[in-house]
Amino acid sequence: MFENTVQLSQIFTTKNIIIYFIIINIFGFFIMWLDKRKAKKGSWRIPEKTLFIITELGDGIGTIAGMYTFRHKTQKIQFVIGFPFITILEIVTIIYFILR
């Protein structure tokens, strides 16, 4: 049991967490660009549920930045309110666990 705790603490380092958030946010920004591009071409689209799942995985900043940079999904209230809400909720949760 103790070995698993040591291994997890080695995986969940501050450096690795920061790297994860950088990568996931770049990915979300790219996904918003890709979906906008596909929308313009009239081809297969990324499901809205998938965009929300990506945001829930810690990608709020990337998807919000992509949404406004590419003017994609800005007319849909569930995205305009949902992405920032999820992001704020995640930030508050992280702060709670840090200060606890």
Image (cartoon, rainbow, N blue to C red):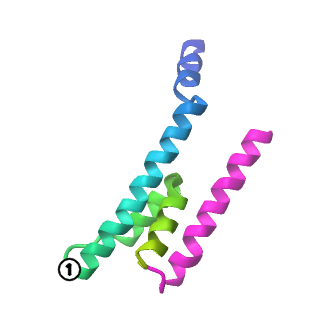
Residue 52 seen from this side: yes
Image coords of residue 55 (percent x, y): 49, 60
Q: Nearer the viewer, residue 89 or 23?
A: 23
Residue type, numbered disc 1 = Lys
Q: In the rendering, at what x and y percent does residue 45 appear?
A: 27, 72
Give left or right: position of 76 versus 38: right
Question: Above or below — where is 12 with respect to 75?
Answer: above
State the residue at coordinates (74%, 40%): 98
Is 9 in front, or is 13? Answer: 13
Q: Residue at x 60, y 32 (%)?
A: 14
**Which is nearer the eye, 55 or 36?**
36
The total of numbered circles placed on residues is: 1
Please say whether residue 93 is one of the residues in the magenta stretch.
Answer: yes
**x 50%, y 56%: residue:** 59
Residue found at the very far right of the displayed protein: 100
Q: Position of residue 82 (x, y in %)?
A: 56, 72
Rendered image quadrant of residue 77: bottom right
Mark 1 falls on what kind of element? helix
| Residue numbers of the magenta segment | 73-100
Identity of the residue drawn at 59% across and 20% down: 5
**Quadrant in which residue 86 is drawn:** bottom right
**Relative height, residue 34 to residue 81 (above, below):** above
Judging depth in this view, the residue of 52 and 70 nearest the camera is 70
Q: Is residue 59 above or below residue 47?
A: above
Q: Tell me if residue 46 can be seen.
A: no
Q: Position of residue 51 (x, y in %)?
A: 41, 65
Decide whether the magenta segment is chiefly helix, strand or loop.
Answer: helix
Answer few, some or many: residues within 10 Å of disc 1's Cα (few below 14, many 20 plus, some between 14 and 19).
few
Whether the magenta-drawn stretch holds residue 56 is answered as no
Q: Mark 1 highlights which residue?
A: 41
